[in-house]
Amino acid sequence: MTMLLELDHVTKRYPVGGLFSRQSITAVSDVSFALDAGRPEIFAIVGESGSGKSTMAKMVLGNEVPDGGRLVFDGVDIATIRGRDAREAFMAKVQPVFQNPFEAFNPLTPVDAYLFATAHRFCGANDQASKEGLTDRALQRVGLSLAEIKGRFSHELSGGQLQRVAVARALIPAPKLIVADEPVSMVDASLRMSIVNLFRALRDELKVSIIYITHDLATAYYISDRVIIMRSGEVVESGDARAVLDNPRNAYSIALKNAVLPPDPKAAAAAIRDRRILNRADAGAA
């Protein structure tokens, strides 16, 4: 079995209290999981703000270096990647999709310029015809076309359209892995399923693995093959997505599930009660 991505007891700490302070906060603690290169999947990392899930994304993208453990992508320790050429080769294989598409694109730059730049940087497209061909092919994959977005600025597109453009930009280098950090949280509820279904299609048709980072158990349940649930930097539950989310065993996982039940007074009261119990337990442990 060949692994696309392996995390081996990964830990990440950040200093607190000033430059010379020896204090630190642990954002990610002893996390391990792996993605099989031969079985493209959607792997969800679920948790609230501060759970460590976005720090995980930064490490997988090579933007942060772990303080302990190893992240190995396609047989190469990400922390050892040095030099422009090696970095470019890695970035072509691992592409991000960020939370807010309106922050991903400069409002003073036409959005197609970003796609042309990606085609030039990662695919060696030097002439305009090549750039436009690669761009249009990627846009067609997400239900758009170059004709629809050419020369347009971010404010001229809807949030759903702009997030599709962001996904298209990520697809241009033909990556093996997409890291999608809260990709539907800033999109209107009516458009979220279109983005979620797009990720499923990319997995099935292009054989791209996707790390789907979210606080939303509903979308994680709908699209994920496997899931880990994080709390305070630690994995509290993991496994097959349906098995874990249908029958969570950890108290925190149960509280998260209760929070997305249909809104009625009893369910809401139970979710609040569970959260208070967890918070008191945290305070007692501290």
Image (tube, helix red, strand yellow):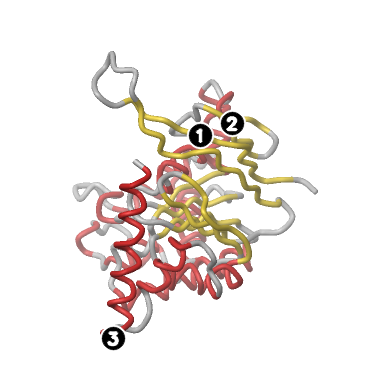
| Residue carrying label 3 | 264
Q: Going by the picture, which residue comes out furthest to the right? A: 1
SS state under label 1? strand
Q: Classify residue 158 as left or right of residue 44.
A: left
The tag earlier along the polypeptide, 3 or 2, is 2
Residue positioned 64% across, 44% down in the render? 5
SS state under label 3? loop
| Residue carrying label 2 | 69
| Residue carrying label 1 | 11
Q: Amino acid at mark 3?
A: Asp
Contact between labelled residues 2 and 3, with CB atoms less than 8 Å apart: no
Query: Picture coordinates of residue 53 (x, y %)?
Result: 43, 48
Dot 3 crowding, Cα within 10 Å, few <14, some 14–19, many 20+: few
Q: Nearer the viewer, residue 228 or 191?
A: 228
Query: Picture coordinates of residue 279 (x, y %)?
Result: 31, 55
Q: For the residues marked 3 and 1, what is the alpha-carbon distance in whole angstroms?
A: 39 Å
Residue positioned 35% across, 72% down in the render? 259
Q: Amino acid at mark 1?
A: Thr
Q: For the residues marked 1 and 2, what is the alpha-carbon distance in whole angstroms?
A: 6 Å
